Image (cartoon, helix red, strand yellow):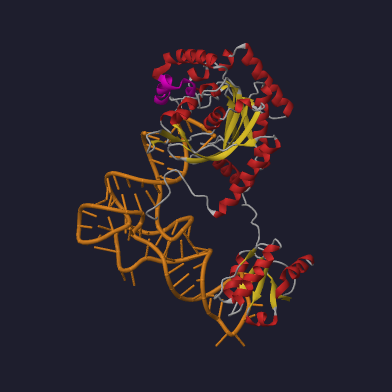
Amino acid sequence: MADVQAPRGMHDVLPEDAALWQFIREAARRVPARFDYHEIATPLVENERVFLRAVGEDSDIGSKELYAFDDRGGDRLALRPEGTAGVVRAYVEHGMASRPHPLRLWYLGPFFRYDRPQAGRYRQLNQFGVELFGDPTPAADAEVMDLQRSFYEEMGLDDLTLRINSIGTPETRARYIEDLTAHFRPHVDTLSADSRRRLETNVLRILDSKEDAEHDAVRNAPEILDYLDDDDRAHFDAVRAYLEALGIAYTVDPRIVRGLDYYTRTVWEFEPAEAGGQSTVGGGGRYDGLVEMLGGQPTPAVGFGTGIERIVINLKERVFADGLPAEPVDVVTIPLGEQGPAAALKAASQLREVGLKVRNGTPGRSMKAQLRNANRANALYALIIGDGEVASGTAQLKPLNARGDQLTVPLDDVATAIHEAQARQ
RNA sequence: GUGGGUGUGGCCCAGUGGUUAGGGCGCCAGGUUGUGGCCCUGGAGAUCGGGGGUUCAAGUCCCCUCACCCACCCCA
């Protein structure tokens, strides 16, 4: 192990994985475009207040997972732990409220959380997400979920399950939290230590505690769905009806509470059928109060975020279990002798101009070594150019993984020769 | 943040306290003049994660530390 290594919880994407990342990034451009969403990029760093106000100072993300620091001018800054806060800040700052609404945005990039690394959990993580501003109707919730589902399906991830819930308005949520706390209080002594702590900090989390899952008090706990007012109830029912109209399968899970303070009404998560530890692939929800919290006019909004690293895990497990098909090299040049290297460089250049993928051979190596190297690149053809070939203005075109016989071809027009050879395949 | 597991060439792994730490894969080269895959031979490449300690002797035992993995927690 070298004495320098990547910071804890941060990792390199090596060439063998880069194609998979590229595949995901391409899907993350195509799918939102089909829904008429537009890209927005915000700084990796914001004033710390932006995040504290958005995710909540008492949430884990706001209280202990923020990478925060004072810059040289004395400003308190933080690396962004999630995407929505920065987008909303930009929305307010640039007066985007005066653009035609609804306004549809998407983003993709790295985020940072100081958390203990684990499988599927990193300190630098990448997320793709969308935000839809100015549409209060349940159709917006359904559209955003449909976009998220389309994104997964675009990549062949068609086996994720969607779980939805409604957490109502901040007022209903406050009433529910009060009742839930009262419900659990008599059981403090039999609850786990984690849940005792959560009783004071985040009661909702007790509901999906792994340790207390079988506890009677958890099983008999009141459900937030029973606290919804008429408008919230109608909104949730309509969201469900739209999902059914779209043919999107879902289950209602009253335990979904999400970890960020800004959510209102609809919340959801996508998960693999066989859920493991860090299994949530992506989640989202409505956040009708956030724009106002960050200094804008009251504006309804809904969005989701999904973790690229977790998509990578799922794609490797199921969709690309046998690996991504590698794009073969069309031609590897094999320069030999004194005149070969210059002629090979020139021939390679000509071939690339007609769109072929060409790897240059390394001068000075034996023909055997160069052919071995070309073979390992899965090259279709080797183009052998030595002093003899240069003298006669030719090259030897040797099929490696292509069919056909070795040919003597004109050095000044190898492209045509290769096209003819391929046409005979 | 809590508990547990694992760290030996680029990768996967052997290695009862006792010579110069091995193997497979990969990489480089050679197996006669300029022809790949299979095979054979050779080579390069390791402060045994790092630091300290015990011992005549430590990859092996002890302590500390770092990183990764698993569960909790949290969440993407």
Q: Is residue A236 above or below residue A155?
A: above
Give the quadrant of residue A105: top right
Where does the image place residue A52, in percent across and percent down from the top left?
Answer: 45, 27
Where does the image place residue A1, in percent across and percent down from the top left?
Answer: 40, 55
Q: Report the front residue among A226 and B21.
A: A226
Q: Residue at x 62, y 67 (%)?
A: A375
Q: Is residue A382 magenta?
A: no
Q: Is residue B18 above or below residue B72?
A: below
Count of marks, rendered view:
0
Magenta part mainly helix, strand or loop? helix
Where does the image place residue A110, in percent across and percent down from the top left?
Answer: 52, 41
Q: Report the front residue among A137 and A158.
A: A137
Q: Provide the residue span drawn in magenta.
A: A190-206
Q: Is residue A202 magenta?
A: yes
Q: Is residue A324 visible?
A: yes
Q: Report the front residue among A420 and B64.
A: A420
View extreme (right): residue: A424
Q: Is residue A61 above or below residue A423?
A: above
Question: In the rendered view, does B1 fall on the left or right side of A347?
Answer: left
Question: In the rendered view, does B9 fall on the left or right side of A401?
Answer: left
Give the quadrant of residue A24: top right
Q: Is residue A380 visible?
A: no
Where does the image place residue A419, in percent across and percent down from the top left?
Answer: 76, 66
Question: In the rendered view, does B56 fall on the left or right side of A108?
Answer: left
Q: Is residue A46 above or below residue A359?
A: above
Quadrant where the C terminus of chain A sits is bottom right
Q: Residue at x 70, y 60 (%)?
A: A355
